[in-house]
Image (spheres, rainbow, N blue to C red):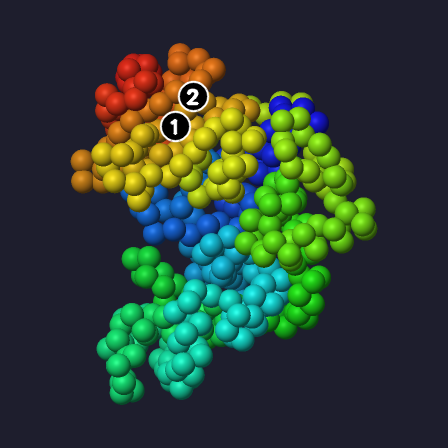
Amino acid sequence: MRPDTARRIALAAQGFADPAPSGRVDRRHLRRVLDRTRLLQVDSVNVFARAHYLPAFSRLGAYDTQLVDRAAYCSRPADRELFEYWGHEASLLPVELHPLLRWRMERAQALEEGWGRIRQVGRDHPGLVEHVLERVRDEGPVTAGELHEGERPGGPWWDWSSTKVVLEHLFWSGRVSTVARRTFTRVYDLTERVVPPTVLALPTPSREDAQRELVRQAARAHGVATEKDLRDYFRLRPEESQAAVRSLVEAGELLPVTVEGWRQQAYVLPGVAVPRRVRVSALVSPFDPLVWERSRTSRLFGFDYRIEIYVPAARRVHGYYVLPFLHDEALRARVDLKADRRAGVLRVQAAWLEPGSAAGATSEALARELRRAADWTGLGEVVVEPRGDLAVALAAAVGAS
C-alpha cells in the first residue's frame, strides 16, 4: 500500500471525508462523528477550547457544544448517550461500549488496574472505600469536595486528596460514574443512576471477546493501523492486543497489509473504504484520535508532534498549545492558539509552516479556519502575533479575509 493511500484511508476512517452538514448541526451529526471516533478524550486544558469539544468542530464546523453536554450529562439516565470512563485516557464513550469495558472495571475492583495510590487505598483502607460509596449512595450527586466537607471518619487518610483517590478507585471499578461536570469538576453518583438501565442489563462478554471487539473498533476508527496503534486506541496491554489481533486475523476479520515506509506490519478491515481524494481544512486538537499517537502521526503525515504544555517556556519550540492544521491530505502547519476571552480575540501566538507546504495556499485556508474557530468560540477577532515562519503570510491572509 502506498503512503498516500494509507493517509486517505485513515482520514476517511476518522470522518474527514464525510460531507459537511448543509444546515444546523444536530445530534445526528454528533452521532456520526462518534461512530467514527468511538470516543472523545477529556482533558482539563482550556486555553483554546475543551478537548472533548474539538473533534466535532474539526469534522463538522461550528456547532453548539451543548450537544456533547446533553449527550453525556443529561438529567434522565435513559436518554444518556455517552458515559465517562477510561477509554483512551479519560474519555466520553458511547454507552453501548459499557459492556466492553466491564473487564477493566472488574480488574480495578480486584486492585489489578489503576495508579499506585488508587490500588493502595483499595488494599489498605477497604472500610474507607465502603464509607465513601455509602456517602455517594446517600448524598449523590456529589463532588469530592462536598464529600470531604461532610461527616468524616477518623484517621490520617481522610483529607481532600484521599477522598478524591477513593472516588477515583470507585470510578475506575465502575461503581460510581460521572453524572455531571461543574466548572469541569466531576460530580459523582452511583453508576446505576447514571448509565441507562437498558445498557446495564446487557450481558457482559468474556474478557477475550470484549478485547477482540475493542481492537475491531479501533481498526475501524484507524482505517489502517499497526498492532501498537490498535492497542493504544483503548489502552490495552500488549499481550491482550496481540492475542486479539491474532484471533481476528485467523478469523479473516482483520487483514495484514504492508504500507511502504512502515517498519511494522499494518492491518485493515475487509472492505475498508479508500477514497480517491480527501478535501478538508481543519484545526486538529492535540487529543484528537487522528494525531494522539505521535509515532503514528509521524508515519502517516511525516509530522513530528510534541505537545509542549509541560515544557518550560524558554525551551518550547512551537508554543504552549499547538494545533496541527489539516489541509486536504496533509498536516500543512501548526498554530499556538489562545482564546483571549477578556480581550475577545483568538490569538495565534505562533504559526509555523510544514516543509513542502505552500505558504500562500496554506495561510489562506488556515485564515478561513481560524475565522470559523473564532466565531465558534464567541470571539470577535483573530490576532496573529509575529512569531513563526508562517506568521507574516498568515497575518496578511487574516487581514484580507
Asked if marks 1 and 2 touch (Cβ < 8 Å), the reply is yes
Report the residue at 76% width, 53% height from top: 247
Which residue is at the front of the view, 146 or 377? Answer: 146
Residue type indicated by callout 2: Glu
- As drawn, 182 above or below 306: below
Quadrant of the image occupied by residue 306: top left
Q: Position of residue 112 (x, y in %)?
A: 53, 70
Residue 222 in view of the camera = yes
Q: Position of residue 81 (x, y in %)?
A: 53, 58
Q: Furthest residue to the right?
A: 251
Determine the residue positioned at 33% across, 39% down: 308
| Residue depicted at 49% across the width and 59% down the height | 86
Mark 1 crowd level (few <14, some 14–19, many ≥20, 10 Å Cα): many
Q: Which residue is mark 2?
A: 354
- Looking at the rendering, in which quadrant would you find the N terminus? top right
**Whole-percent x, y for residue 25 in the image:** 48, 41
Q: What is the total number of numbered labels drawn onto the structure image?
A: 2
CA gap, disc 1 to disc 2? 8 Å
Q: Quadrant of residue 389?
A: top left
Q: Nearer the viewer, residue 312 or 52?
A: 312
Q: Is residue 290 above or below residue 5?
A: below
* Residue at numbered disc 1: 334
Q: Residue at x 70, y 55 (%)?
A: 243
In the image: residue 241, left or right of residue 159: right
Circle 2 packing at 10 Å, graded few (<14), some (14-19), many (20+), is some
The answer to whether residue 42 is left or right of residue 278 is: left
Work out which quarter of the rendered image holds the C terminus and state it.
top left
Horizontal side of 241 relative to 31 (left or right) equals: right
